Image (tube, rainbow, N blue to C red):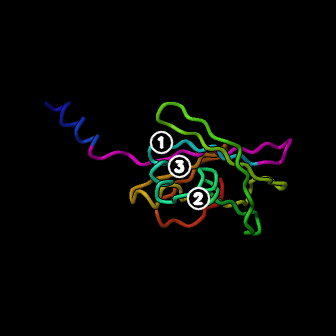
Amino acid sequence: MVMACLAAWCLAHPIHTTLTNVTFDRTTAQVTAMVRAFSADVDKALARRRGTTVADYARSAIALADQAGRPVPTTWCGSRTEGDVVWLCLRARAPRGTGGMTLNDTLLFEVFDDQVNIVMTEHGSVLFTKGDSPRRLP
């Protein structure tokens, strides 16, 4: 009985989250953001933005700024699906490294009010919830 209730609660209260790993490649001076999201959640976001590609959606939701606060353009480096998860890849030039860069991650905030986006780097992590401002990368 307890297990049935627990299972029913889990179905009624899904977790809305993404996980983004941000890495820096010194040899190419590029930062890569690899986002793990649930495919169904991304599909819901795209349905709300008819005609928008997943690449355009990801690029609009994940924004980088350099040390002076200037936007850093990102390029799409593809996606892949594994079961119910989709991996989205973005890259950007970072000639001065990631120290002092800021990031904003609003992926899926327009779909779920309880969305939580976790961003991890080699130096730490930051959490984004709806309404948060851009944060410095750890």
The amino acid on which the numbered mark 3 sits, given as a three-letter code, is Ile
Q: Residue sitting at 24 percent across and 42 percent down? A: 9
The magenta region covers 12-30
* Mark nearer the N terminus (1 vs 3): 1
* Farthest residue, direction left: 1
Which label sits in the foreground, 3 or 2?
Answer: 2
Q: Residue sitting at 18 percent across and 32 percent down? A: 4
- 5 displayed left or right of 85: left
- 100 displayed left or right of 112: right
- Which image quadrant for residue 81? top right
The amino acid on which the numbered mark 2 sits, given as a three-letter code, is Ala
* Mark nearer the N terminus (3 vs 2): 2
Depth check: give the residue in front, 118 or 123.
Answer: 118
The amino acid on which the numbered mark 1 sits, given as a three-letter code, is Phe
> Could you classify mark 3 by the number of other residues whose Cα lies within 10 Å: few (under 14), some (14-19), or many (20 or more)?
some
- Residue position for label 3: 118
Disc 3/disc 2 C-alpha distance (Å): 14 Å
* Farthest residue, direction front: 51
- Which image quadrant for residue 70? bottom right
Q: What label sits on residue 61 in the rendered view?
A: 2
Q: Residue sitting at 80 percent across and 53 percent down? A: 93
